[in-house]
Image (tube, helix red, strand yellow):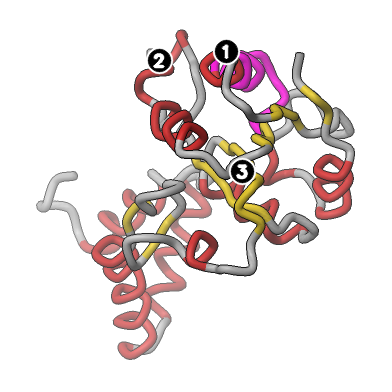
Amino acid sequence: MPESRGPIARLVDYFAELPGIGRKSAERLAYHVLRMSNQEAIAFAEAIRAVKERLHPCRSCFNLAEQDECAICLDKRRDRTQVCVVEQVRDLLALEQAGGYRGLYHVLQGRVSPLEGVAASQLTIDRLVERVRQGGVREVIMATTPNVEGDATALEIAGRLKGLPVEITRLARGLTVGASLEQANHEMLADALSGRQRMP
């Protein structure tokens, strides 16, 4: 981004790069920041910096964490026999907001997508298999997006876990095919979890 541009133009450019933000929305956000008090603007900038400097992937599940492990992995009240596999942290957050699930998670950091050049080896599947091999996990719940790529990712994982003493289930198909977890409402996600099915 050229530094020769004015500060407002540069701020608009940065906002416009955010997913789902068009040019007009980016301009509104930039002018909202301009109207903030100095204290509010500095707090906003500090929040962004804190996210970048203090958060990193959890060493166990790849959720966002400030320590070695995330708050969910550190919570002794969680059921450690269940691991719910999601594509992104935002999917984990959607399931947590829906409530009802008290097990652990595993964040793949993407999904298998040949068209986008994403192979299974680029995801955290190896670490998931290692977690299951270590013992204690009795059920792996596939919560990948219900579309071709999400299903292909789930089948890849099921193949890698074959022969290990673990039951593999997937969310019930009350979810609309092609819809992402973050777009589903809380009741839909809770029903999908409670009605999960055994994978073939």
User: Residue type at mark 1?
Assistant: Gly
Residue sitting at x 51%, y 51%: 24
Q: Residues within 10 Å of mark 1 (few under 14, many from 20)?
A: few
The image shows residue 150 at horizontal and vertical percentages of: 62, 22
Say whether marks 1 and 3 touch (CB < 8 Å). no
What amino acid type is highlighted by mark number 2? Ala
Query: Magenta segment range?
Result: 143-156
- Corner quadrant of residue 40: bottom left
Instruction: Please report whichever mark, 2 or 1, sits nearer to the chain's N-terminal start.
Output: 2
Residue drawn at the location 64% of the way across and 47% of the way down: 81
Which mark is on residue 119? Answer: 2
- Relative to 88, does residue 25 appear above or below in the rendering? below
Sooner in the amino-acid sequence: mark 3 or mark 2: 3
* 77 horizontally vs 186: left or right: left
The CA distance from mark 1 to mark 3 is 16 Å
What is the secondary structure assignment of the residue under circle 3? strand
Q: Which residue was labeled with disc 1?
A: 159
- Quadrant for the N terminus in the image: top left
Which sits in the foreground, 168 or 45?
Answer: 168
Question: CB of mark 2 within 8 Å of CB of mark 1?
Answer: no
Point out which mark residue 118 bears. none
How far, Cα to Cα, is label 3 from label 2? 22 Å
Other-residue count near label 3 (Cα within 10 Å), few / some / many at <14 / 14–19 / ≥20: many
The residue tagged 3 is 83
Nearer-N-terminus badge (1/3): 3
Image quadrant occupied by the C terminus: top right
